[in-house]
Amino acid sequence: MRIAVLSGKGGTGKTTITSNFAVSIKNSISIDSDVEEPNLHIFMDMKTPISEPVYTLYPSIDKELCNLCGKCGDFCNYNAIIPAKNQVVVFSESCHDCGGCKLVCPTGAITYKKREVGKIFKGKTKYDTELYYGILNIGEMSGVKIINQLKKYSELDEKTIFIDSPPGTSCATVAAVEDVDYAIIVSEPTPFGVSDMKMVVEMLTEMKIPFGLIINKAGLGDNEIYDYCKDEDIEILGEIPFNKKIAELYADGKIFSDSLPEYKNFFNDIYKHITEKRSLL
Ligand code: SF4
Ligand code: SF4
């Protein structure tokens, strides 16, 4: 079972929730797909990870064969290949490696070169769980390639997988949550939290992914989030109180359910509830 944890914006406690699930649910695997700013491995104290590069392909033009017909430029949705007056210009960072321009080129002038866009790291954590995360190279525009590669590892295993998704509703978030069995939104009970969460609710509804909400820092704001969930029939899976002890553990880089074992039951109960719900679908 694959469960994505996501939020409307960064800093709402998404990684905190993912790490607490990862240490509470036995034999689970966690994936940090926030490849622009991964930090789950820091919380979970990952030991000596193995890394491997992730490549993308981009077009290279044989000037001898190119007749400047313009078909590649017409095809590309990303303006990554532009036939100019005397030559075809390629913007490799904008290329999404779809392979389409080669297919439409009538003269066989296009081949592909590979470029490293980032790395994947895999290994064990201090909690003896498996963890995968990726890092996008500086200057690269899209982490989708790395996220898709990270998710391929999860397909190899039957264990429960928690995916810490990129914040918001970007292409990277869509790639991270695509094909998951369930999504957990994390939000704070403030007007900003509700506003950011609405975009995520729309995205998951559009993608037909079942989801529920964990309210982080409950007691901090007002009732808007409860009214919204009632109006939209969104299930509140649980609430983590705005609590000094939890904040201190977080500030020390600790996973709070490791020090407050009652929260292991909290995360286990939510997990059990989700699996029961899924079995009924
Ligand atoms: S591979 Fe796809 S995205 Fe890249 S330049 Fe060709 S058509 Fe554009
Ligand atoms: S489709 Fe092929 S031949 Fe036509 S402009 Fe592009 S590279 Fe040149």
Image: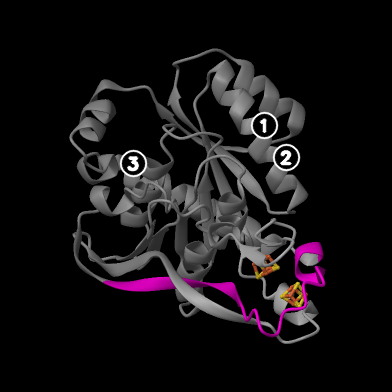
Residue 213 percent location from the top left of the image = 57, 38
Residue designated by label 1: 198
Q: Residue at x 21, y 33 (%)?
A: 249
The magenta region covers 51-74
Circle 1 SS class = helix
Left or right side of 119 for 275: right
Q: Residue furthest top?
A: 222
Counting from the top left corner in percent of width and height, residue 198 is at 67, 31
Three-letter amino acid code at the position of disc 3: Tyr
Amino acid at dot 1: Lys
| Precedes in sequence: disc 3 or disc 1 | 1
Contact (CB < 8 A) between labels 2 and 1?
A: yes
Residue tagged 2: 202
Left or right for 103, reference 132: right
Q: CA distance from mark 2 to mark 1?
A: 6 Å
Q: Residue at x 70, y 85 (%)?
A: 65
SS for callout 2:
helix
Crowd class of label 3 (few under 14; some 14 to 19; many from 20; radius 10 Å): some
Specify whether residue 67 is painted magenta: yes
Alpha carbons under labels 2 and 3: distance apart: 30 Å
Above or below 157: residue 76:
above
Q: Quadrant where the C terminus lies?
A: bottom right
Above or below, 202 relative to 209: above
Front residue of 261/151: it is 151
Q: Which mark is residue 263?
A: 3
